[in-house]
Amino acid sequence: MKGYAGKFLRVDMTTGEVRADVLSEDVARRFVGGYGFVGHTLYNEVPEGADALSPENVLCLWTGPVAGTTIPVSSKYIMGARSPATGFIGFGIASGGVGSELKAAGWDGMVIKGKAPTLKYLYIQNGNVELRDAIPYAGKTTWETEELIREELCDDEVRVSSCGPAGELMTCLANVTNDRNRQVGRSGMGAVMGSKNLKAIAVRGTGSVEVANLDELVEFSRDLYKRCRGPATEKYRLYGTPANVLVHNRLGCLPTNNFQKGTFDHAEMVSGERMLETLVKKVVACPSCPIGCDHINVVKDGPWAGTVSSVDYESLELLGPNCGVDDLNAITKAVELCDTLGIDTISAGVTISWAMEAYEKGLITSEDVDGLDLRFGNAEAMVEATRRMCLREGNLGALIADGAARAAEKVGQGSEKFAMVNKKLEWGAYSLRSLQTATLGFATSVRGACYLRSGSYQPDVKGTVDRYHLDRSRGKYVFDGENLYAIIDSLIICKFTRGIYKDNDEIAKILRLVTGFDITAEEMIKTGERIHNQAKLFNVKFGVGRGDDYPPDRAFEEKMYDDVNDGAIIIRDEYDEALSGYYEERRWNEEGIPTRELLEDLGLDTKLGV
Amino acid sequence: MDAKRIIVCDTEKCAGCEICEYICSIFKEKTINWSKSRIRHVRIEPTFDIAIACRKCEEPLCVKACPRDAVIELEDGSVRIEKDKCNGCGWCIEACNFGALKLDWDHKSVFACDFCADLDQPKCVEFCPYEALEFTTLDQVGHEAGVKAFKRIIEELG
């Protein structure tokens, strides 16, 4: 079997036993890799009712068939587990060199169970795999952990994924960092690492990555590199993803002050253009990436001088405009805190903006926020709140560390209505009422509030549909996007390259060249549908229903007024209709449960079908 | 003296994608294996990247260091590793000031860049998507730096 290492690791943290298991060709063909393998592993191996932070939960890490090849931006890996934040499927994809290194070490992935008696890290050097003492790294930041492990192993080429102090504290929103700037960000995979007493995974591989057709793969890669330097990726190369700030502001979909508005008066102050001019020191790339979207900011002066971090659109937007903050230095600092201490920037931004709104409305007191002047626009308060959230410090840290939904549950008084979450996970940086197809896609996503599962903002942004209204036909956009993205996330290739492919057959071609599987574009998309439904079945196993597929109440109950929008709102009946349309497209029932017929058709377990 | 062409890396352009390492292993070893690359990417966190290959030193220390005369200096200034003599002791790697040599884990030997001698330019240079790598002479590098500096002065003076 080419493209795959053909084997994966099984790690029992409780006993310390590590053993190799075989990746079957059947699983490879049916689920491709990455996201597909996560869904397959978790559905089959997480026991019913297992608490996300208990030893029974399963933490898996997978690469896809393209990891370690020359295909542009293919060095990715995914981590998955039942999410402590949502209770449903949790996972995050990160770039950097861990995925390619793991493949070169001869492993497609790993499945980790149990809980170690003391803090450990997993060291994989080709066929030598061991759990090592990580007590010296307890409480260390992710950046310190990377450096210290390399020092301990006397190998600067070791790639390290680690959780920060927030992960060790089992904070619901804890992330995992590798190569300093790359994160398994969403849905709390860092907390699951913490719950298993697993501080880090360190990988070094010196083997070869075998593909089915090397000569053609290289020629195709050469062509793709050229396309990666062309117009399809220009904005990522030039400004990185913060190029979107002014675009979204013009469209009235730049979440501001906890999604109360869709435009920000000081958008120019935090634009990608301004960031490039004033803060960006260097563009860096992940292995095999010809684009280089990662823009490293270095703060030169002021209270946060010396801060270094890679700031992308979501982080910038949600810790910036969505908290009313127009100070790029402060945003860069908050991102650095999140990345090093180990919390997802998206969840951090949306949780702090919730706290700011609750504070301004008098629903939480000065004592609740440790005396911080937590008003929208206060950059210093935003940075301090981020730090407290990461370390669960003080009253404020205790209140907000586990995210907006749980904080709102404690505070009540209607604050639940402006906790901008879906499935208890914080919303991405796209305004709800002025991008309504996007909202449908985010709210129905298996991971919760997810902008990465379907690209459902595209018909809104491109003007293909009326973005201020919903109708039954919108489900089709979400359906198509999800099936394709399921493949992209299973191969795993970077979504920023999606524009360089002429059609889906070129993506199928990657799979053919790497694995040798004879697969058409149509079969590939069907596989995407299977992968998506497998992930959905995991959620069904843990009790998901129609009610979990709605955006927060603010979208239905408050009209949005700003420079672009004049009373934008989502009409509940329209949303209901669009949701039913989506379920119908998916061949799910009105509760959003897959039908047995569909599951049979896709070759999935029919037990939970209706 | 003929000017020697070497692989020069513009550190402002290099983003650390390591595609040079992938490509080198493919064209030299017919497999994807960056640990078998003749060019080495080095990153110093957080903001420095460079790719390093043989510098064609005037009096190569790697040649001098080899106790088995397995490192041979060629006419173009590059070095060749005589695999039948080499036992992978690694003194040449220690001797090189640039980290341009790499241990061959599988064959108890060492990898050294031959600049794809049978081609017009090395494959890594051809593939570098950031155009950070150039196959050029140090004289030319100096000249281009001078041109660049002069252009900047002209622009500033209007």
Image (spheres, coloured by chain):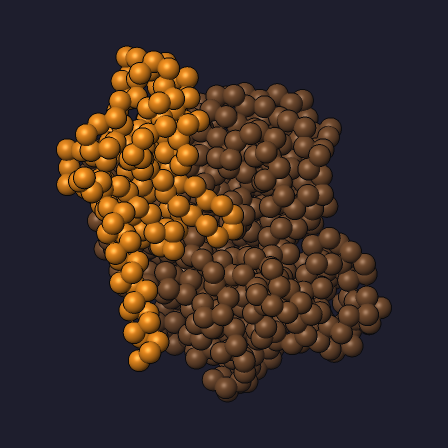
Chain colours: A brown, B orange
Residue A32 is left or right of residue A297, and the answer is left
Residue at x-position 62% and y-position 64%: A305
Q: Position of residue A50 (x, y in %)?
A: 66, 38
- Identity of the residue drawn at 26% across and 57% down: B144
Task: Answer whether residue A321 is visible to the viewer in this image.
Answer: yes
Residue at left offset 34%, top offset 51%? B10
* Residue A75 shown left or right of residue A610 in the figure: left
User: What is the x, y in percent for residue A565?
Assistant: 49, 84
> Residue A269, relative to residue B126: is it above or below?
below
Quadrant position of residue A153:
top right
Side of A319 relative to A285 (left or right): right
Question: What residue do we see at 57% from left, 64% from top?
Answer: A299
Residue A69 placement, left or right of A59: left
Q: Is residue A115 at least partly visible in the picture? A: no
The image quadrant of residue A318 is bottom right
As drawn, which residue projects farthest toward the front?
Answer: B1
Which of the pair A503/B75 is nearer the observer?
Answer: B75
Q: Quadrant of the N terminus of chain A?
A: top left
Q: Nearer the viewer, residue A209 or B135?
A: B135
Asked whether B41 or A589 is in front, the reply is B41
Where residue A384 appears, as percent x and y from the top left, is 71, 64
List x then y, in percent, for residue A457: 42, 66
